[in-house]
Image (spheres, rainbow, N blue to C red):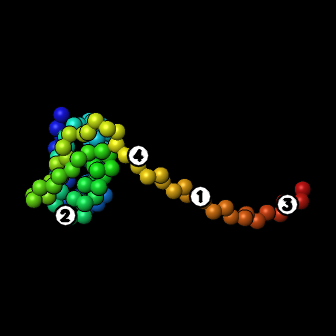
Amino acid sequence: MEKTLDCRGLACPMPVLRTKECLEADHPDTVVVTVDNQAARENVDRFLSRAGYAVSATEAGGILPSPRPDRPPHPPPPRPRLRRRQRAIPETPKPWS
C-alpha cells in the first residue's frame, strides 16, 4: 500500500510527526512525503532511515522511500532519563492547640 502526505508549509517538527503518525496508523509499504524546505527534508529523511525505510529524494522536495526491507529496523537510541530536582521544604511550625 502506498500513502501520500503533503507537508508543505509545515514547520519542523510537524512533517516528521505527521509521517510518524502515518506509519503507526497505516503501516504502509511505501510513503511519499512532500515538503518545501531543506530542514524538513533532512529530518523526514533521517526519521524514515531510522525507521528502516530506504529513502530517495526527488528534485521537487518529496521524499520517496522504497518498500520496507525484510530486516527489522534499527532500534532508536535510548532516551536520557530526566530527574526532577528535589527541594528542601522548610517545616512549618505547628500551631499550639
Q: Position of residue 94 (x, y in %)?
A: 84, 60
| First in sequence: mark 3 vs mark 4 | 4
| First in sequence: mark 4 vs mark 2 | 2
Q: How crowded is the residue under tag 4: few (<14 C-alpha within 10 Å), some, or many (20+)?
A: few
In contact (CB < 8 Å): disc 1 and disc 2: no
Q: Is residue 83 left or right of residue 61?
A: right
Q: Amino acid at mark 4?
A: Pro
Q: Amino acid at mark 2?
A: Asn
Q: Position of residue 76 (x, y in %)?
A: 41, 49
Q: How far apart in space, not on screen, are marks 4 and 2 (Cα)?
A: 27 Å
| First in sequence: mark 1 vs mark 2 | 2
Q: Which residue is mark 4?
A: 75
Q: Which residue is mark 2?
A: 37
Identify the residue shown where x is 21% and y is 37%: 29
Q: Secondary structure at mark 3?
A: loop
| First in sequence: mark 1 vs mark 3 | 1
Decide which of 48, 4 is in the foreground and name it. 48
Q: Secondary structure at mark 2?
A: loop
Q: How far apart in space, not on screen, are marks 4 and 1 (Cα)?
A: 24 Å
Identify the mark at residue 95; answer none if there is no mark.
Answer: 3
Q: Which quadrant, please, contains the N terminus?
A: top left
| First in sequence: mark 3 vs mark 2 | 2
> Which quadrant of the figure has residue 69?
top left
Identify the mark at residue 83; answer none if there is no mark.
Answer: 1
Residue at the right extreme of this rendering: 97
Q: Amino acid at mark 3?
A: Pro
Identify the mark at residue 26; answer none if there is no mark.
Answer: none
Decide which of 82, 49 is in the foreground and name it. 49
Residue at the top extreme of this rendering: 1
